Image (cartoon, grey):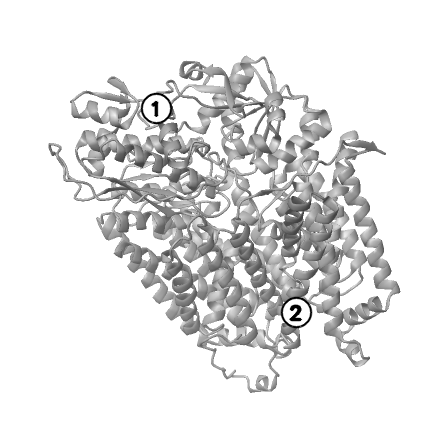
Amino acid sequence: MHQALLTLGFGIVTASILALSAVAFTLEYAVTNVANVSHGEILTVGAYAAYLVHQRTGSAIAAAIAAAVAGGLIALAMHSAVIGPFIRHGASPTVVFIATLGMSFIIQNVLVIFFGAANVAYNLDPGAPRQIGPFLLTPLDVEIIVSAIAITFVLYLIISRTRFGKALRAVSQNRELARVTGINATRVAAATFVLAGLIAGYAGFVLAESVGSFTPYFGFGFFLITLTAAVAGGLGRAFGTMVGAILVGIILEFAGGYISASYNLAFAFAILAVVILVRPRGLFTNARRTVFE
Amino acid sequence: MSAYLVSVLTEGAIFGIMALGLNVIWGWSGDFDLAYYGYVAVGAYMTLVLTIGPATAPAHYILGLQLPYPLAVVVAVLTAMAVGLIVGLIALRHLRGIYFSIVTLGAVYVMYVLAGQYVPLFDGYNGLSGLFDPMGDWFGLDYQSYQYFFMALCLVAFALVFLFMWRVSGSRFGMALRTLREDERAAAAFGRDIYRLKLKGYVLGAALAGFAGALFAAYLSAFNPSAWSPVEVIVLYSAVLVGGRGNIWGVVLGVLIMGLLVQESTRFLPEVPGHPQIVLALRGAVIGLVLVLFLRFRPQGLLPERRFVDPDPALEAVPRTA
Amino acid sequence: MHLSLASSIRRASASRLLAGSAAAVFLVAACGTTSSTGSTGKQPSGPVTMGVLSCFTGTLSSLGAAMLQGSQVAQKAVNDGGGILGQKLNITHADTQCDEADSVPAVRQLLAANQVVGIIGPETQEINAVAPIVMSAKIPTQFQGGSTLFDKNTNQWLWRDSPSDSQLGVAMALYAYNKGYRNAALVFYSDIAAQTFPPPITATFQKLGGKIVSNITIAPDQTSYRTQVQQVIATNPDVIFTQTDAATAAVLYRNFKELDNLQIPFVGTDVTGGDDYLKAITYQVAHAHLISIYGTSVSGQAADEFNKDFAAMFGASQQPLANANYAYDSVISQALAIDKASSITGADINAAMTSVTNPPGTACYTYAACLALIKAGTKINYEGASGPLDYNQYHNVFGPYGAFQQDVASGQQVQVQVLTAADLAAATP
């Protein structure tokens, strides 16, 4: 039992990082109705930015800020250069999906040109672990969990209490209707991408810190798991995605510990396939079974 | 240099067969299938375990039947079709658009992880080897002449596949698949069994992938997880897109451009001293860029598909959604 | 058609992976003078070319960098020592991207365009696709991978001057058992290492009377390894056998520090003895908790020569890349075989190989000295910079292994125990 509780504690750390990444992905989906395959590269860019700034300044806080800002900028660039124009041009969600896959390729390879393909070691001292309740967590873990909760809370306030949040919800529910009522859907979508990019960039920083190393392909690997969490929770639904992320994070930690970590990706996709087939709109929504785009 | 040219032409023919198969699924049926390269791998792995001898320690793998190569190719293609059928049964039943793509992405990563990690299947990371010059001894060929023989074999196989696809393209089946791509609901309204039709197209695509994989296995004489990865399908998509999605002549043009021009010509670019990665990374970036730019500015490709006339005149009234 | 993007789900660390990167410095050798040796076989009409076939791009590119570096040091030794059959030695290279599919055009390019007389490489990833090609072309090839599948290699064109990973596994188990450890855990990265090392370690350790209490694989898509670390600790092992890449090791040791204050000692491989690995976990931690097992040289003379030539080329402040010495010995031994055969035909070189590397014969340690002996008609036994280089019937070498501990002050690995070839033979299951 003790062992299982410890695993649960580690799973919560994984789930927190996953929740940040997945909630950002689902925000991107909400305002564009497009699954951004290059989402993982926002995390990668965040990790590189954090690494570079950390090397120069030696400050973890500066690194975190740099990761978020870089994430926000690259997400904005993704929207302005590719996703936005495609949508304005009337491209179908599948076409934009393919285009973002191409974009993911471009960013990965540009990063290889600048930084090489080899592992970059990024080691911070996480501090000594402490017994917190039944869990054994380092100060770094606590920071990750607390920051994930705080970011989620702020995001909740933004979406529910601000004018921007209202516009965001309007665009995500019905882009055309929102436009008719005078909302500039493109600008709202761009702003949402910046917001999602800030979160995903920061997620890239904490993921890099937690894993201890990364390559230009690092975000793409995590994107595959992010996708599982977001689809399981319900694409485009922030709350559902959050719950999906926590479930997937914890399930993967247990599967990795008790079966074999080598099969993690296969486990993730097995969960995904079952969810899509049984409840295609997500576990926490009521909707039709069939998904025709 | 000619030996190099021989290997480029051999690879080009194999790549062409892969692209023609993908064209059935994406070009005609309209589904963005990410599991496609998995069927290539199934074809290659199966060809090897069917033709090589039984595993001896420390290697582990299934079968090892030492069948003649042509028979192994047939069985490998059937296996790829069976795997394609299973994935198709699941993914095509209710899912379209990105949900279909996501499930097929999942399927191919499950295949990749199993092939790489589950050692008793195909010996994991070590993979399989030992398919030396299949059919070479039937004709008493030495190593050099075998290379020409195998190139000719691949080119003939490609030509046959192309002819077959040409027939399919104009057949009722080919027309029907395109109808689904244009408007599935309308097609359903006209009494077409969408699921069956799509499944047939999907399994046909998987068959060609498996066939290409079987040739690839003979070309490499070995296959392991370093030889493939699920994302390699991107290059195939870029070829089909650039050439002209749905048009088999366009697909051939796309293979020439992306396969030969972009892939092979970069081998001869000078290495940037101290940064050997750059040429390869630039190639990857160009493939991504080509994908984005063509989707945005010329989605029909360089040789667009001809507008076809469906024998069912009522469908012509259906509006087209690109 | 083969982008090396597989790396998005797997991280680098083949058995021979180590070390950082090196600037690829190219020495262009000038044309030599005419041959003066009494000729029996095919004589070179210009520079003699050997090709390095390895990956120079992708996450495993450090493998190619080390192989090229060792080959270039050997090139200098050969050309300074009188050349091959009166000609200069040229080194060229081709990139396999560590991808089986890309290795085929790469090796064909080497054979067709560069007319190489010998190949250095490739590593385990591509060997199966390369082997039939070099066999057909009859080109001696110096396989640089640790794959246990080649322990009983019957392809006469393949030579492996580095010991197989299975011997390393035996040596690791033997060392641990001799230290009195009886319960062991296996912690390997989910790449080829996870498939290669556990079987020989387990078999040997069990044969000796020990027990494997847990076998854990570390995978790339995990955010922390603590669940696995916790499980290892829960099984109470006396020792942990391990190999991961350096970056993963940093987190792994950190997790062990957090959860049990690094109470369980580690026994590692040539990879864990590499400087980037040691730096990643810090020299202090390495000194206190890690012993790395790898091949050790009987005589230092050849190694000194290698280091001298290396310093002359790259500067005295530089350290050779790990395993560059194997490629160095590959080139030197092939060059000596050409001298001995007095022919650049693959079959002649291949036939002469063991007559310059294996006993009996006068031991020699440098290219120049060995060449002088050959010219004098003496039967030689080249003792290499990486080991004695005595091939068995499967073209594998066996060497003594050393157990190495990191010295904090000097930053060097210090040998603390030798495991002789006889000890290993006795322990092998």
Task: Name the front one of labels 2 and 1.
Answer: 1
Relative side of C124 to C255, left or right: left
Image-quadrant location for residue B316: bottom right
Q: Position of residue C420 (x, y in %)?
A: 43, 15
- C289 or C87, which is in the foreground? C87
Subunit bearing disc 2: A
Q: Give the answer, above or below, for where A194 lies relative to B226.
A: below
- C230 or B30, which is in the foreground? C230
Image-quadrant location for residue B66: top left
Q: Give the answer, above or below, for where C258 lies relative to C31.
A: above
Marks 2 & 1 on one chain = no
Q: Position of residue C85 (x, y in %)?
A: 18, 35
The amino acid at mark 2 is: Ser
Which residue extends farthest right?
A: A161
The amino acid at mark 1 is: Ala
Q: Residues within 10 Å of mark 1 (few under 14, many from 20)?
A: many
Q: Residues within 10 Å of mark 2 (few under 14, many from 20)?
A: some
Relative side of A81 to B252, left or right: right
Read off the residue under disc 2: A80
Image-quadrant location for residue A165: bottom right
Q: Residue at point 36% right, 57% down?
A: B268
Read off the residue under disc 1: C302
Q: Which mark is residue B218?
A: none
Spatial CA span between label 2 and label 1: 61 Å
